[in-house]
């Protein structure tokens, strides 16, 4: 009897070892009930894009190119989303485009009255225009070309930019006319007041002349 007991203990140990190996193979972990606190606690951080005070008028996927004057060729600027954003307070509209993966800004400029979109020669899905761009942190005179996935998207983009530019040109024209009219009225009022002053001066001269013989 004493010779058989070690054999039974060996079988039990082997079974326990097999159970541990099976649990490891299936990816199961033994629950010890211990709780491990994180070493670093991460806090939620608010991310700002600079577009919080603007309303989106247009949001489309496109590919942007810029003309390299030194190399006399078009170079790809990035593929991503182009937006037309209108400021909620001053009403100014700017064109912003970010690269899809890095979100790096590849175009950032105002749409002004002289902004003119032109169809790119040989492609009805592309537009070309000039702008004073600030994407690189300094103002640069750039020539851009943008390509959309469809003719419809290109036309929608071009028509909206042209509409904004024409509206600004009309507003500036009315403002100049108003300033000219105000200046003309001011000149007229000054011109009309001068004869009255000279007339009063003449009356004073006549009074003095009449008073002299009486003395």
Image (spheres, grey):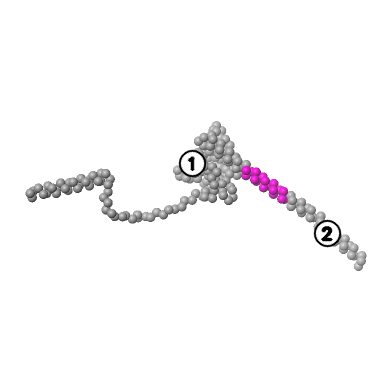
Taking the spot 87% from the left edge, 63% from the top edge, the residue there is 208
Q: Which quadrant of the structure image shows residue 199? A: bottom right
- Identify the residue under disc 2: 200
Residue 80 at what x, y percent from top left?
Answer: 48, 41
Q: In this view, does 83 lie above or below 205?
A: above
Distance, label 1 to label 2, CA atoms, is 75 Å
Q: Which numbered disc, 1 or 2, marks the residue that appears first in the sequence?
A: 1
Q: Residues within 10 Å of mark 2 (few under 14, many from 20)?
A: few
- Identify the residue under disc 1: 80
Residue 49 at what x, y percent from top left?
Answer: 49, 49
Taking the spot 48% from the left edge, 45% from the top edge, the residue there is 104
Give the left or right position of residue 79, taking residue 26 as reference: right
Residue 197 at what x, y percent from top left?
Answer: 81, 57
Q: How crowded is mark 1: few (under 14 residues within 10 Å), some or many (20 or more)?
A: many
Please tell me whether mark 1 sits on a helix, a strand or a loop: strand
Give the left or right position of residue 45, taking residue 188 as reference: left
Q: Is residue 200 above or below residue 19?
A: below
Disc number placed over residue 127 in the picture, else none: none
Residue 174 belongs to magenta span: yes
In the rendered image, the residue lying farthest to the front is: 1
Residue 77 visible in the current orientation: no
Q: Is residue 5 above or below residue 120?
A: below
Which stretch is magenta?
Answer: 167-183
Placement of the C terminus among the 4 image quadrants: bottom right
Taking the spot 54% from the left edge, 33% from the top edge, the residue there is 123
Viewer-nearest residue: 52 or 210: 52
Please tell me whether mark 2 sits on a helix, a strand or a loop: helix
Magenta-drawn stretch, dominant element (helix, strand or loop) = helix
In the rendered image, the residue lying farthest to the bottom is: 215
Residue 181 at what x, y percent from top left?
Answer: 72, 48
Residue 194 belongs to magenta span: no
Taking the spot 56% from the left edge, 38% from the top edge, the residue there is 156
């Amino acid at each position: 009897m004493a010779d058989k007991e070690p054999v039974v203990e060996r079988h039990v140990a082997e079974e326990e070892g097999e159970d541990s190996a099976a649990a490891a193979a299936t990816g199961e972990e033994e629950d010890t009930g211990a709780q491990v606190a994180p070493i670093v606690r991460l806090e939620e951080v608010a991310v700002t894009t600079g577009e919080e005070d603007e309303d989106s008028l247009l949001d489309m996927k496109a590919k942007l190119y810029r003309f390299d004057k030194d190399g006399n060729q078009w170079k790809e600027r990035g593929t991503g989303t182009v937006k037309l954003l209108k400021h909620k307070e001053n009403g100014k509209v700017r064109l912003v485009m970010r690269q899809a993966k890095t979100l790096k800004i590849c175009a950032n400029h105002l749409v002004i009255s002289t902004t003119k979109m032109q169809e790119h020669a040989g492609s009805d899905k592309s537009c070309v225009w000039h702008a004073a761009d600030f994407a690189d942190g300094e103002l640069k005179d750039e020539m851009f070309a943008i390509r959309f996935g469809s003719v419809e998207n290109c036309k929608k983009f071009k028509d909206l930019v042209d509409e904004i530019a024409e509206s600004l040109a009309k507003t500036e024209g009315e403002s100049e006319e108003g300033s000219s009219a105000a200046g003309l009225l001011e000149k007229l009022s000054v011109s009309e007041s001068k004869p009255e002053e000279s007339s009063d001066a003449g009356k004073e001269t006549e009074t003095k002349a009449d008073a002299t013989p009486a003395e």
